Amino acid sequence: MIYVDPPFNTGRAQVRRSLSTRPAAPEEGDRRGFKGRTYSSVLQTLSRYDDAFEDYWSFLLPRLELARELLAEDGTLYLHLDYREVHYAKVMCDIVFGREAFLNEIIWAYDYGARAKRRWPTKHDNILVYVKDPGGYHFCSEEVDREPYMAPGLVTPEKAARGKLPTDVWWHTIVSPTGREKTGYPTQKPAGLVRRMVAASSRPGDWVLDFFAGSGTLGAVAAAAERRYVCVDSNDEAIATMRRRLPRARFLDVAPDGRVEELAAD
């Protein structure tokens, strides 16, 4: 299974900042604290990458072609995008995989972010699902977590207790800014979201791959689910985040000429 969460080509920098305070003289401080002590605010940029490409499709197309090549015959690709590029990506994936290989478009719905006043607020991402072999792909719904029925009184108590299988619309909160799951990486995706894909489209011992690994969510989910994994990224902050999150993983540096060097532990 391959999960791909590439930059969304939003045209802006993705930035994570931290606001802190430090003691300051009364004439320099911008806020007061306990017993009248004065403090100044410090806004620190912790990580940043530019999410803008002059030619987005020449960037993404060869990676999708390689993804199809790498997939096992019963393998599945999950391509995570948003409304800006997903419609073009659907056409591209139809060309690369074949229209008959299209399995689903999953809508990840959440309630967070800006409250637009002049249009409908955008509160979802799109995840395109393609398989290598339309007649022989692996999908196990029994391994997937279940959801509560919206009207449990309309089903038997046994069904209500078990829950229902998810549809192609997944309601799942974002990673809480103050929760234990938060790594600090600006585009981190929830483990619960990725766990559902891993459970449905791979078996224990299978390989899973994310070549825009970011915060390493796929690796963390795969390790807990007894899957083998490969996470790839070129962003220094992503590598640092994954080193903290995946302490048992091996880290390899692959040079442009193909030379591979194992990185020493921090």
Image (cartoon, helix red, strand yellow):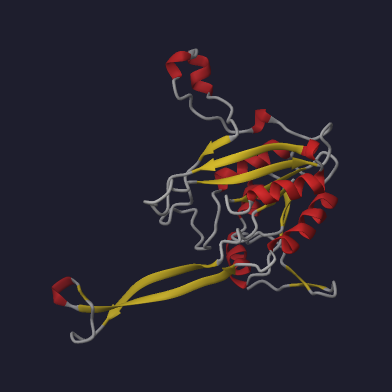
Most extreme residue toward the front is: 118
Where is residue 31 shown, x and y percent of the image? 22, 75
Quarter of the image holding residue 234?
bottom right
Q: Where 203 falls versus 209 (above or below)? A: above
Residue 197 position, x and y percent, is 65, 41
Q: Can you say which quadrant of the picture contains the C terminus?
A: bottom right
- Image quadrant in which you'd find residue 59: bottom right
The x, y position of residue 172, in whole percent, is 50, 41
Residue situated in front as seen by the camera: 14 or 232: 14
Height in image: 99 above or below 81?
above
Question: Number of marks in the image?
Answer: 0
At horizontal 58% and vertical 31% (from top left) the residue drawn is 166
Residue closer to the observer: 218 or 87: 87
Residue found at x 60% / y 34%: 168
x then y, percent, for residue 237 = 58, 70
Residue 199 to residue 53: above or below: above
138 vs 216, left or right, is right
Quadrant where the N terminus is found in the figure: top right
Q: Of residues 177 and 143, which is closer to you in this image? A: 177
